[in-house]
Image (cartoon, helix red, strand yellow):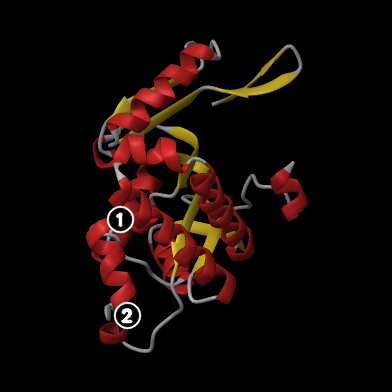
Amino acid sequence: MISNYLGQQWVQAHGVTLSQNQYDFAQEKIKRLGLEDRVSIELRDYETLTGSYDKISSIGMFEHIGLDNMGRYFEKMNSLLRDRGMLLNHGIARTAKASSKAKRKIRPERKLILKFIFPGSELDSIGRTVDLLQIAGFEVHDVEGWRAHYAMTCKAWHDALVLNRDAAIAQVGSEKYRMWLLYLAGVSIGFTQGSIHLYQVVASKHAAKGLSELPLTREGLYA
């Protein structure tokens, strides 16, 4: 819900996560910033969430849904939004493949990621993402490629981990430190070369005929 308070825009926000560490971090930050009356968070599966929302943002989660579950995921997002409500879906993608067999083929480096970094994760193409959004009842307004941005982000994370080597090893051990250092270096190269992609899609629930409530330009979306 977007409100106006003393001439400033602010939101009443609610978040869900399955990560205890993420939940604890967010709760501490909410308290530290004095936002308890505006922001809440639950340790909860998104599939069990109920209610009606004006806007939903899903960032860094889509990769963990699984190819077979993506249609149901967008249907759930649609059910939680009011008509003309907005969804921002942000996730890593792979290049489109000519067949289902090719889509599910896993390269050796991908096997390492699945085993040690992100078990169960699967990447889809941006084309199928747009198809599934429309099938679920969304109108797609903007598809923006952030591959170059994320290449720099992963490099920055890698470099920060190197600078904090001793503290990281003290916390998680040398084996896990080296594993994540290699992962961040590898994905930064992957985003730089274009073997993996990152897209941010803005869509709105289109339950009734007529225009959406979105601005007419990308500049308007950012504003």
| Disc 1 packing (10 Å; few <14; some 14–19; many ≥20) | some
Nearer to me, 128 or 207: 128
Front in this rendered view, residue 140 or 144:
144
According to the picture, the residue beneath numbered tag 2 turns out to be 103
Measured as percent of width and height from the top left, residue 44 is found at 26, 32
Q: Is residue 109 above or below residue 114?
A: below
Res 209 visible: no
Q: Residue at x 29, y 77 (%)?
A: 108
Give the position of the N terminus as an image quadrant.
top right
Does residue 96 show up? yes
- Please name the amino acid that badge 2 sits on: Lys
User: Which labelled disc corresponds to residue 117?
Assistant: 1
Residue type, numbered disc 1? Ile
Residue 52, x across and y down, in percent: 41, 32
Circle 2 sits in a helix, a strand or a loop, which is it? helix
Between disc 1 and disc 2, whose residue precedes?
2
The Cα–Cα distance between marks 1 and 2, rounded to whole angstroms, is: 20 Å
| Residue 45 placement: quadrant | top left
- Callout 1 secondary element: loop
**Which sits in the foreground, 199 or 134?**
199
